[in-house]
Amino acid sequence: MSIAELRSQMLRRKPLGQVEDEGSTDEQLARSLGLWQLTAIGVGGIIGAGIFTLAGKVANSVTGPSVLISFLIAGVASAAAALCYAEFAGMVPKAGSAYTYGYVSLGEIGGWFIGWDLLLEYIAVAAVVAIGVSGYFRFLLGQVDIALPDWMMGANGTGDGHVVDVFAMLFCLGTAWLLSRGIRSVGRFESVAVVIKVALVVLIVVLGVFHIDSSNYTPYFPFGAGAVWTGAATVFFAVFGYDAMSTAAEESIDGKKHLPKAIIYSLVIAMVLYVLATLVLTGMQKYTEISPTSGFSTAFESVGMPGIANIIAIGAIVGIVTVVLTFMLGVTRVWYAMSRDGLLPEWFAKTHPVRKVPTRVTWIVGIGAAVMAGLLDITVVAELTNIGILMAFIVVSVAVIVLRRTRPDEPRQFRLPFMPVIPLIGIGFSIYLIWSLPGRTWVRFGVWLVVGLAVYFLYSRRHSKLERTGSVDTAEVG
């Protein structure tokens, strides 16, 4: 094959018309999600481990009280990307989210890059959050004096005698079971759990504000002002759950109309709650005393409110589980979309004949997330997660600029304002945050991409549906 032919394969774009026609086969997904169910899934994906676990861990060892600024930095970058997602969601409301957006605007290699990236990152997010759930579960066991063997209480290196985090593994497998029951069940669970979670955060803020000691905010930058950028890069995964929510586009009743609104609503709600919660957490306890695993429960216990601490732990478990659910939903839909396009074996795109969900992929993802959650430390997994999601944001921000140029007259339910300033802001923030991550994260991510490129050149480009049908958007190529 000549270089020109190889280049043509890599840059062929999926026609928008073909994307619109998908979902008419026997393997289509069931449509049952309305605006508020989509928003609940988005809020469910954003609010969780970021507040209940990672905020405390980052405050304790990375930023100190200035963790609030880290969340604000991450929120600005995420908001810029959210607007890009909103424009795409109003044009291409299909399973796959950033993968599909990249495929129709940047070509097959761009779509492959972001899809392969998200397969790892979403599974890693689910694992991070499951570890967070496990931390609060262990706190509750301690409150009722239940002692379990040390070997099952955490991954190797996270504590004396720790070997594997059994509870985190069970949460991942239980989530896979719930996903396999159908999208209607998922939507109902998310709606109820998100109400509980938001009410819990409001309770934390209302009660905690009376126990703030302003001296705990001093020094505000104990690790230096530059540490807030490292903190932002670490907590970034906590502010982009709308991305995983957008992968459920094909299961929404009116995706073009509802998805852009759901993306924006979910991010605004989450950021307000994040700011208030981190302000309370770092005001209630000195940053050196904040628990890296169950921050709010231990904070309320320290001010003589053990009953509230237990309520928080129970609510945190319910709330954090919704994040596991959202991101496992996301990775299964990306995998489903890639398989439907032929870039991965179409065996994975088979759906349950009654429930209309990709059960094969769901259980593979559940087992993969369980292994990662059981054996790895939360910080390692969080760093790996963030570099991939930041890469996804860069691709989506570039893609929205490209599609504005190549398809300026295409109907858009939502038009990104201040083009191309906002996408460029998202790209700039994302690059800076990636640069703030440790070198070991780059190495791990690089290894995954090398494996992905091998899969693409050995399998995907030859089995692509575009290769078999020749249905390429030639108006956008070249």
Image: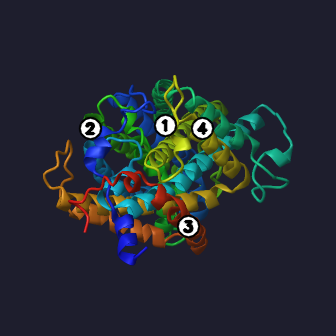
Residue linked to disc 4: 360
CB atoms of marks 4 and 3 within 8 Å: no
- In the picture, the disc for residue 256 is 2
Which amino acid, by three-letter code, is at mark 1?
Val
The quarter of the picture where residue 269 lies is top left
Comes first in the chain, label 4 or label 2: 2
Which amino acid, by three-letter code, is at mark 3?
Ala
Whether residue 294 is visible = no
Which amino acid, by three-letter code, is at mark 2?
Lys
Q: Nearer the viewer, mark 1 or mark 4?
A: 4
Position in image of residue 4 (x %, y %)? 35, 75
Q: Indicate whether 192 appears above or below 204.
A: above
Instruction: Give the crowd class for mark 4: few <14, some 14-19, many >=20 residues within 10 Å.
Output: some
Q: Circle 4 sits in a helix, a strand or a loop, which is it?
A: helix
Residue linked to disc 3: 454
Q: Residue furthest bottom?
A: 3
The front one of 188 and 199 is: 188
Comes first in the chain, label 1 or label 4: 1
Position in image of residue 208 (x %, y %)? 51, 40
- In the picture, the disc for residue 201 is 1
- In the picture, the disc for residue 166 is none
* Cα distance in 3D space between marks 2 and 1: 31 Å
Q: Nearer the viewer, mark 2 or mark 3?
A: 3
Q: Circle 2 sits in a helix, a strand or a loop, which is it?
A: helix
* Cα distance in 3D space between marks 2 and 3: 35 Å
Q: Which residue is painted at 40% across and 71% down in the image?
A: 6
Position in image of residue 266 (x %, y %)? 37, 40
* Cα distance in 3D space between marks 4 and 2: 28 Å
Comes first in the chain, label 2 or label 1: 1
State which quarter of the image contains the C terminus. bottom left
Q: Which residue is painted at 42% across and 43% down in the image?
A: 247
